[in-house]
Amino acid sequence: MSGGGALRTNAVGLGGAVIMSAALMGPAVSVYFNPQVVAASAGVATPFVFIVALVIMLVLASSIMEMARVFPSAGAFYTYVSRGVGPRSGFVTGGLMFVAYALLVPAELALIGIYTSDLLAGYGVHIHWTIISAFFIVLMVVLSLRGITGSLRTAAILFSVEVGVIVLLSAIILAKGGAHGLSLAPLNPASSPTGLSGLALGMTFGILSFVGFEAATTLGEEVRDSHRNVPRAIVLSLLFVGLIYLFCTYSEMIGFGTANVGKLTADTAPFTTLANMYAPWLQVLVGLAGISSIFAVTMNANNGIVRIVFAMGREGLLPKALGKVHTVHRTPTNAIWLQAIVAVVFTFGVGLLSGPFNAYIYLGSILTLAIIPVYILTNIACMRHFAGPGRSERSIWRHVVLPILGILVLAIPIFGQVYPAPPAPLTYFPYLVLVFIAVMALIAFRIGRRRPEVLQRAGAVLATGEVDDTADSEPTNVS
């Protein structure tokens, strides 16, 4: 039974917000499946790529935290960009965020299906990946229907398990000296066999590993003391997971040996291989940690996209039925069911056409390319806001230098995606995102001229947000 109303307020504290951001980054997923992709271009310098990716994210986090402190809206990036740049740019931002969250769910569901299927096959149990993915779709829906607090509690448990396992195995590898002893080569950019271009291409997947660090911003309505806790959750989750990436990717490279990069890039489950080599007794736990991490990412991404659909229904941009919430659990029941249907279509549609692991790579690449322009626009918004309405609080370092630096460093992964051109279909994805941006900009321009109030409302809810009532009474740009 459903009824009208709002989501449960004050349901999430600082710890829950940190867990949502950290779990959505999925440390085990990134450690298990991204380093071998990075190593294909960056070689031994793969851990260095993750260091640079962390620095880039910390620079970007500065602008995000500054804007979250001033505008702690669940609209997150939409609110920041629409206030700092204008409602049309905010609308495009909302569309890009919608794509990022929407594609992450089926990408992870396809991955969890094939990964679990392969693990079970190692024990003589053969179950097709589609059956496993279907099981986790059902579990995701059940947890979502029970409410955000229950979902975060489950995510906290899964997150603790995965972090404990991957850190333990990494420590064992280093304690045993790896394949050929410890070395500083993985931390040296000169170790990249293709130089800067290899580092730049690898950076795309380095940044993919951090996508989700800003997830706490989508819980603006539900986090206690959001002015204070949302910015803190952003930086704490970034630092915590970034250190995990550095430690584990370094251990992974040392475990295979700096002379055996080819073995790493050819291995579809390198951490499982390392467990077999250095700690066979951890094999089962390593497998479970991988499954738990993928599912944690799935749950948290699903929470984000469901709230987009819920807000669109509540504001009349989608059928009003999608804006209903359960009278007991206070969860957007109808939106949850609709998102489940969409997840089924993309998970099995793309997965069956291209293969489940390729579905993860392709959808993950597109969502990363979609979110990079959002980060760029947020830096621009930060500069413009504190040069205008927020000038009394302006800091040259936080509101000029760091935002400009953030825009410049994002040129690295963009460069890597276009030169030298990666293999098809990856080479087409940047242009696909550009076409999407152009279409969203055209829509924003037309709606902005005819019905500007609809443009503002649409952009807000696309970005997992609420309509910011105070924006209606304040002057705003039309960019």
Image (tube, grey):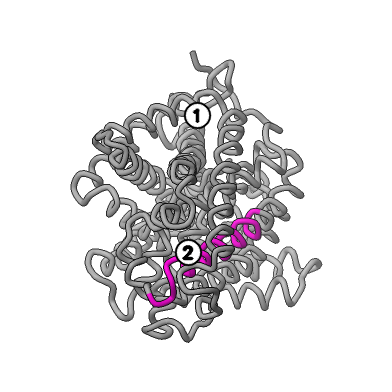
**Could you say which disc has been placed on residue 144 in the image?**
1
Residue 242 quadrant: bottom right
Report the amino acid beneath label 1: Ser
Residue ID for mark 2: 252
Q: Residue at x 53, y 19 (%)?
A: 326
What residue lies at 58% left-to-right and 31% top-to-bottom?
148
Q: Establish if 192 lies above or below 171.
A: below
Q: Is-magenta flag for residue 354?
A: no
Residue 428: percent from the left, percent from the top? 26, 67
**Crowd band around label 1 with a 10 angstrom C-alpha radius: few (<14), some (14–19), many (20+):** many
For residue 416, what is the image quadrant?
Answer: bottom left
Q: Which residue is drawn at the image coordinates 67% and 65% (left, top)?
A: 62
| Above or below, comparing residue 353 to residue 157 in the picture | below
The kind of secondary structure element at disc 1 is helix
Check if residue 249 falls in the magenta segment. yes
241 on left or right of 253: right
Image position of 147 (left or right of 274): right
In-image side of 184 versus 121 (left or right)? right
